[in-house]
Image: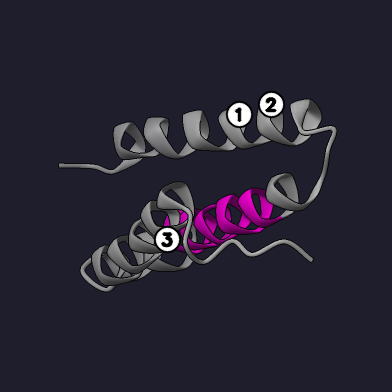
Amino acid sequence: MAQYEHLPIYKKAFELSLFLENEVKNFSRYQKYTLGSELRKKSRRVAILIIRANSRTDKLGILLELREILEEIKSEPEKIPS
């Protein structure tokens, strides 16, 4: 299996996961278990897809899925009430 820990994109994905874990702690109880759970799951999925794309020769499908999930994560803050 190809090495991935050194990749800048993997490092950023890991930082995103840590950031979201810390932010979800501050959500209201309802948001923590609905939206927060979804955000944490998606951030872990991003890291997994980066690992998969790094070890495959045909990366297009994986990268398209990765882009879709990242766009979903970007749209999530709109759902959080101020």
Give the answer, above or below, for where 1 lies relative to 50. below
Q: Main secondary structure of the magenta part?
A: helix
**SS for callout 2:** helix
Reply yes or no: does residue 60 show up in magenta.
no
Q: Which class describes the residues within 10 Å of circle 2: few (<14), some (14-19), or many (20+)?
A: few
x then y, percent, for residue 2: 72, 61
Give the answer, above or below, for where 46 lies relative to 11. above
Residue type highlighted by circle 3? Gly
x then y, percent, for residue 40: 48, 62
**SS for callout 3:** helix
User: Which image quadrant is residue 21 in?
Assistant: bottom left
Q: Going from the N terminus, do you reach mark 2 or mark 3 first?
A: 3
Q: Which class describes the residues within 10 Å of circle 3: few (<14), some (14-19), or many (20+)?
A: many
Can you name the residue that lies furthest to the left here?
82
Query: Can you identify the residue that label 2 sits on?
Result: 64
For image coordinates 77% across by 52% down, the residue present is: 55
Q: Nearer the viewer, residue 43 or 3?
A: 3
Query: Can you identify the residue that label 3 sits on?
Result: 36
CA distance separating discs 2 and 1: 6 Å
Reply yes or no: does residue 36 show up in magenta.
yes
CA distance separating discs 3 and 1: 18 Å
Residue type highlighted by circle 2? Leu
Residue type highlighted by circle 1? Glu
Residue 15 relative to residue 52: left or right = left
Nearer mark to the viewer, of 2 and 3 = 2
Query: Can you identify the residue that label 1 sits on?
Result: 68
Q: Nearer the viewer, residue 79 or 70?
A: 70
Give the answer, above or below, for where 12 lies relative to 79. below
For image coordinates 76% across by 26% down, the residue present is: 60
